Amino acid sequence: MTGTGTRTIKVDTLARVEGEGGLYIKMTGDRVTDVKLKIYEPPRLFEAFLRGRHFSEAPDITARICGICPIAYQMSAVHAMERALGITIDPAVRLLRRLFYCGEWIESHTLHVYMLHAPDFLGYADVIELAKDHRAVVEKALRLKKTGNRIVQLLGGREIHPISAAVGGFHKMPTRNQLREMVPDLEWALEASLEAVRWTSTLQFPDFEQDYEFVALRHPEEYPFNEGRLVSNRGLDIDAAEYEGHFTEFHVKHSNALHSVIRGRGSYLVGPLARFNLNFDKLPEVAQKAALEAGLKPPVKNIFRSITVRAVELVFACAEALRVIREYEPPARPRVEAPKGAGVGQGVGQAGVGQAITEAPRGILYHRYEVDGDGLIVTAKIIPPTSQNQKRIEDDLREYAGRLAAWPLEVATWKCEQAVRSYDPCISCATHFLKVVIERE
Amino acid sequence: MLIIGCGNRQRGDDAAGIVAAERLRALGMAVEVCTGESSELMESWAGADDVIVMDAVVTGAPAGTVHLWDHLWDGLHLPAFATSRGSTHGMGVAEAIHLSRALGRLPARLRVYGIEGTHFEIGSAISAEAERGVADVVSRIVSEVRA
């Protein structure tokens, strides 16, 4: 598209439960003049909903924020509360929480790689169309996802939203035999994940490298889930308690979500690419080898290649789940009780404040709680990965859409959809239910 | 017969399928519940030959209206099932049906009771209108089972 005509790429969704979400790009000639990503963000509403509730309710309430990553919300909640209350968990609980997170990563990454993102690369409208021509691929995805479901169901302990994770540990612990029963499925899943790495690496990726500030947790011994310092490739190295001193949020008119930026520097990227680039050395050998053979060497700066990075993280999650199951010994007691009388970080009857960051499938999830002397929540703050990536998505789309000026509008729109899906945003427009409106002056 | 209720208890009328499941359970019937996420649903109905799914829907009809979709293998256009977008980034009940058909895994008979919802605010309770829809679905299923 050349000349001075204005063209508008509008990727809107049907208004449904989550409200509106969509992408709006305005172009004048070859120039992108406006990019707006609209996100409807439930976590903000939950912050108000949490005030006045007992600290022990936070993991169950926040687990209902997202149907895809309830474990992430539970994990950030329990760790933040444990910090506020001064609770130290049993090492076996810590290990089991890693397994829990493995289950969620397997579920979420499988859904995204095969059912949401792969159809984009292969030219199908959605996974249903993909299934007609590539039945075996979709069957494999369903089986892989089921492996993750099994872990989450076993440790979650309830039918819909997992409720077994508690402040201080778990309400109930599984037996070693229950865990071992999952080994054959996980061994199959590990092989399937290795195949996913090989398969996704053969897809065609747009040439689109950007200079990102990657932000992820980093732990001295392990690929991050629940613990570590928050680091970046530009020198950030902080504890979760320092998060709000380094990051700030601001309201944008076009979205009811807040945009998050690093103070003094701007947008940043969280999620699989950031984790992989900052923690490649902590991946197990099997995942490192698979990545290198697929041509992935950190730093990976092309967001479209996140599909293969997710597959590498699937390999990691399966290998890690098998390791945890091998090493697991049930603890003497499933849960450490909070001190009596409490909300109590620094002493009985005193208020406590606790922050935690954990790695949700789509990036870091920050929780902060202030708890009073009766154990009731005074304030809650939740910053989900999608709002952390939102400004970065807009920055990237501004650049990317400019390169698509010569393409017919339908193609350009489809390419922009594919780009947005690369970040796995937790919004309605990550789906294939998209409406496109074209305006030309 | 396998009966499955889908939804989210914390999202107003989206609880309709779950509430219906609980009512049926209280009457001594075996009912499964799930979020409505596609793969979970497909796992639930794998191997079953007569399945009823209960879920909140948004079609524009008055709140509490009960819809019944049968003969789903005909490629009938399905409305926006309320749980599909809310819980799983767009992979919900309708997608589970379409995907099952594409993979040849659709139960021989599959029916969907849709209860029209209008209020989905976080933390809110199910509306009186949707409750009436729930009661209607429960009584229809009970009379079928007891007939």
Image (tube, coloured by chain):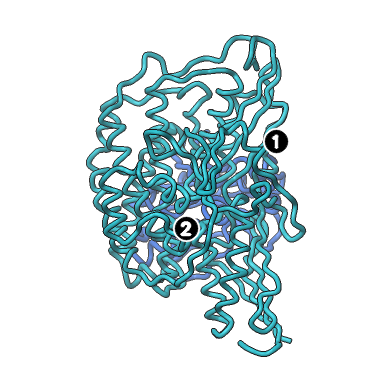
- Residue A198 located left or right of residue A161: left
Horizontal arrangement in the rendering, residue A135 relative to residue A348 (left or right): left
Kindly tell me whether residue A246 is visible in this rendering: yes
The foreground one among B16 and A281 is: A281
User: Residue B51: x percent and y percent?
Assistant: 42, 53
Q: Secondary structure at mark 2?
A: strand
Q: Chain of mark 1?
A: A
Residue drawn at x 33%, y 64% is: A201
Chain A shown in which color?
A: cyan
Residue topped by disc 1: A49
Q: Which chain is blue?
A: B
Q: Farthest residue toward the bottom?
A: A3
Q: How many marks?
A: 2
Identify residue type, mark 2.
Answer: Arg
Is the residue marked by circle 2 packed among few (<14), some (14-19), or many (20+) residues within 10 Å?
Answer: some
The part of the image, by quadrant, that contains residue A177 is top left
In x, y percent, where is residue A283? 34, 44
Label 1: element kind: helix
Amino acid residing under circle 1: Phe
Query: Toward the viewer: B43 or A239?
Result: A239
Residue pushed farthest front? A235
Residue drawn at the location 54% of the way across and 50% of the way down: B87
At 42% from the left and 75% from the top, the residue drawn is A123
Q: Quadrant of residue A176?
A: top left
Left/right of residue B81 with respect to residue B73 in the rendered view? right
Rendering quarter of residue A135 = bottom left
Above or below A82: residue A65 = below
- Same chain for labels 2 and 1? Say yes or no: no
Task: Name the residue that disc number 2 marks.
Answer: B111
